Amino acid sequence: MSTVHPTLEARQTPTLRGLPLIGSLIPMARDPAKFFLDCYRRFGPVVRMKVLGQPYVLIAGVEAANFMGTREGKECLRSKEFWQGLVEEYGATQVLPGTDGEAHKKLRDVMRHGYSKESIQGRYNELIAITDGSLRRDWPVGRKVPVVEAMQYMVVDQLGTILTGAAPLEYVKDIRITILHILNVLVTRQRPKILLKRPQYKKAKARVYELGEKMIAAAKARVGKIRDEERNLIDDVMQAHLDTPEVMPASDLIVTLTGPYVAGLDTVANTTAAIVYTVLKHPDVLARVQAEVDALFAGGTIEEDDLLKRIPSLQGAIMETMRLYPIAVAQMRTATRDFVFAGHQIRAGEMIYVGTSVPHFMGEYWPEPEKFDIDRYAKPRAEHMQPGVYSPYGRGPHTCLGKSLAEIQIALSMARLFYKLDLELDPPDYVLKTKTAPTPGPEMDFKVRVKGLRH
């Protein structure tokens, strides 16, 4: 597929012609998944382009997805440049998604348990209780509920309580505003830097700092006073700071401790909101999901073992939604050295989009790819098991650290929502509108009506 050595036989890489000054910004911002797929269909796995005057290389398809997991992919690609603006904005030295190599491994080791499903073993029913509280608070009967916003509050409620011991709901809007500005301006670079001068952003950022300081104080107060089995993410981070300050310096504590909210607010909230839409849009799927969750909660509490295996229809709906509405449309990297990919020369220092979601929409791997089909993932079909075709959590060494936790969180949240509430799209023929910045997902004005309580 590729080699790190330049060759005389390297192909001439095609170049996508964009508009003056802005390049390919408009089609990429409008629908990045479709844009990257169209590029792959027209040009193959490698194409050059410009966005806001900056040159990029797009590598895409199963070729790119599989390359991310190889030793060569790990050695030839790094993530630092795309996250450096966020690091500097926080006055930190590094963040997990912006580190590579040994430094990245050390940070993952610090946070691995806190972000794992093992961190909530024995606490599934507690997570259900948190979810029920969110449903009572934000999903009243007879009301049209803004789904993304309601899910954001639920996610902060869940992650805050489970990962850090507190649910700072009063900071949700501040976190949201800060995420929007930092990711749009400093990471994906879809917006100008002048936006960081806005009073709205400065106020929200100060509030996130305030939250971070409270979390630092809470973590310090717990040091030496809790049992190992009671440790959560902030305990692990604080202990790493005390034991290995070179790995976790004081300057990195705020961005690290508020990380769960930054990581989960947009991603999990967008995904769960999309699942609400796809299940309600397909009455046959809704009926299957309701039958499963009614059986799951028939005894009041649930057993944790093999949870996902007991809700195959819901799990299929979740996976299919993540195929059609991927959060990780592409991963952004920089070439660490010269290498050849799929016969095309890529030079050290070039900035790269890795279109790992492109295969999600290809009929070669997913028959009728535009169709919502929750049975794709069950044997004998198991279409997602084809190498490189399904990448909902990214690929390579930066694959989402919280993947296993997110799978449980999303499954329990959706199971409880469809168990407790009788929902409908309003109007019934509503077609989901999506946004792309800073992460893809349903528009904030997507609402559903709560017709009544099922249980």
Image (cartoon, grey):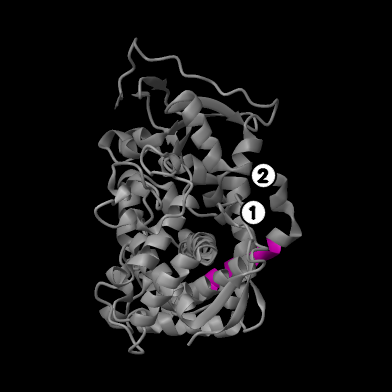
Residue 50 vertical position relative to residue 407 in the rendered view, above or below: above
Residue type at mark 2 is Arg
Is residue 209 covered in magenta? Answer: yes
Task: Count the labels in the image.
Answer: 2
Residue 46, x across and y down, in percent: 44, 26
Residue 38, x across and y down, in percent: 52, 32
Residue 231 vertical position relative to residue 12 in the rendered view, above or below: below
The numbered mark at residue 191 is: 2
The answer to whether residue 391 is visible is: yes
Judged from the image, the secondary structure of the residue bearing numbered disc 1 is: helix
Q: Which residue is drawn at 44% across and 66% down?
A: 285
Is residue 400 covered in magenta? Answer: no
Residue extent of the magenta highlight: 202-213
Q: Earlier in the sequence, mark 2 or mark 1?
A: 1
Question: Contact (CB < 8 A) between labels 2 and 1?
Answer: yes
- The residues tagged by marks 2 and 1 sit, at their Cα atoms, a distance apart of 8 Å
